[in-house]
Image (spheres, rainbow, N blue to C red):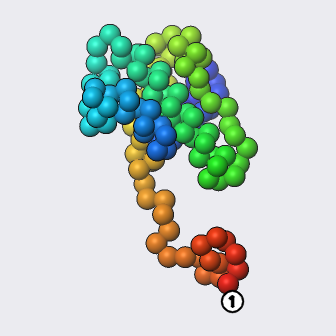
Amino acid sequence: MILNGKEYGLYLTTQAWSEIAALCPDGNFAKFGSLMEGQDSMKNVVRILAALSRGYADYEEIILGHKRPEVLTEKYLSALSPFVFTKAGVMDEITNAMQGGTEQEIQTEPVKGKNAEGAATA
């Protein structure tokens, strides 16, 4: 997602899922769509983007072993004009991040020559 000329990653981790579900009525993730309705919709978009941004940073740092990227904070996002969100295609970005985070990440077969801990096998 590009905001003010800078690219930020978004990714649905289990932590981001939990944070977003907590925003949903009754904590029910199936009611996600209702977060985009009513007077709190922009506040919810800001919270969702911040959670997905932290998710991306965690994934990059913890899973991939990369340097932790800069995250979008609620404070930063709240300072932006709503028109910036429209221009950035925020809803498409959220949808893409949430679909990408639900892809299978588990290997079904071990890598040849290594055990589950990553040590070489005979």
Displayed quadrant of residue 44? top left
Which residue is identified by label 1? 122
**For the residue marked with disc 1, what is the amino acid?**
Ala
Would you say residue 75 is visible in this rendering? yes
Q: Which residue: 70% across, 80% down?
A: 120
Horizontal and vertical percent for residue 1?
54, 32
Horizontal and vertical percent for residue 116?
59, 72
Horizontal and vertical percent for residue 69?
68, 37
The relative height of residue 9 versus residue 88 in the rendered view (above or below) is below
Q: Which residue: 57% across, 34% down?
A: 54
Q: Which residue: 60% across, 42% down?
A: 58
Would you say residue 93 is visible in this rendering? no
Q: How many marks?
A: 1
Task: Answer left or right for 115 relative to 107.
Answer: right
Determine crowd level at label 1: few under 14, some 14-19, many 20+ residues with C-alpha closer than 10 A: few
Displayed quadrant of residue 74? top right
Displayed quadrant of residue 112? bottom right
The relative height of residue 73 versus residue 11 in the rendered view (above or below) is above
Q: What kind of element bears circle 1?
A: loop
Task: Answer left or right for 35 relative to 80.
Answer: left
Query: In the picture, which quadrant includes the C terminus?
Result: bottom right
Horizontal and vertical percent for residue 82?
46, 12
The relative height of residue 117 versus residue 47 in the rendered view (above or below) is below
